[in-house]
Amino acid sequence: MVPVRAFPQVQALPPSPTEHMSPATAVDNVRKQGPRNSADLVHEVLASYATNGLFRSFARTQRQTRKSTFSVEWPFRKAQTVRVDVDAGIISFLDLLPGVPPKSPMQSALRTFLSELHAKRRPAHRRIDSKKARVRCVRFGGNLSVVVTVMDCDYEYATTKLIQAVQEVHFGFLHDGPYYEYRVAELGLNPDGF
């Protein structure tokens, strides 16, 4: 079972049928059941990250057959939302970068940074295969979200690469770029300890 910190606005959901299995077994079982359970597959991949300590907390906040919403909390950020829409073939990490002005150099740089994650020159384990998944940034309101489009119904691969892309944004794009003030003002991060 995944350690879950209760969020005040989240109601407890019935347990997943795969809840008492290891993440690898659960992922295999959901994959065998076909695309109608792709949201459950995303759940199992995210749950395995939580079990392994990547997230401070993790919960499924909305559960439907073809759409689900999850709350994940990184050790260095407050809770954020991951949304999966099987009908659209999209998994979104919502509001990853809040308060980025439209058409700003930062938005443009993020688009370029994410497109580079598909580059052939990257090591295979760090590259996103564009035949399997395509990652991009999308503006919702005043915030930038990272979205992956699932190209071949491999939701396990797409979810893994979405989390990889978000980590690359945190530890590469934000840390190595000229975003010291942004990290402090908008994300509340301690740049000296991150």
Image (spheres, grey):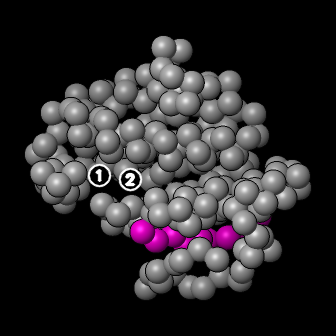
What residue did someone put label 1 on?
98
**Which x, y percent locates residue 52?**
53, 62
Work out whether 10 lies above or below 72: below
Question: Taking 149 as reference, is 116 left or right?
Answer: left
Question: Taking 60 as reference, is 38 left or right?
Answer: right
Front residue (pair 137, 75): 75
Question: How far is disc 1 from disc 2 in space, using C-alphas?
Answer: 6 Å
Q: Secondary structure at mark 2?
A: strand
Q: Quadrant of residue 75?
A: bottom left
Specify whether residue 33 is painted magenta: no
Mark 2 crowdedness (10 Å alpha carbons): few <14, some 14-19, many ≥20: some
Question: Taking 75 as reference, is 163 left or right?
Answer: right
Front residue (pair 35, 166): 166
Which span is picked out in magenta?
56-67
> The N terminus is located in which quarter?
bottom right
Front residue (pair 25, 181): 25
User: What residue is shown at x 46% (from left), y 59% (from top)?
Assistant: 54
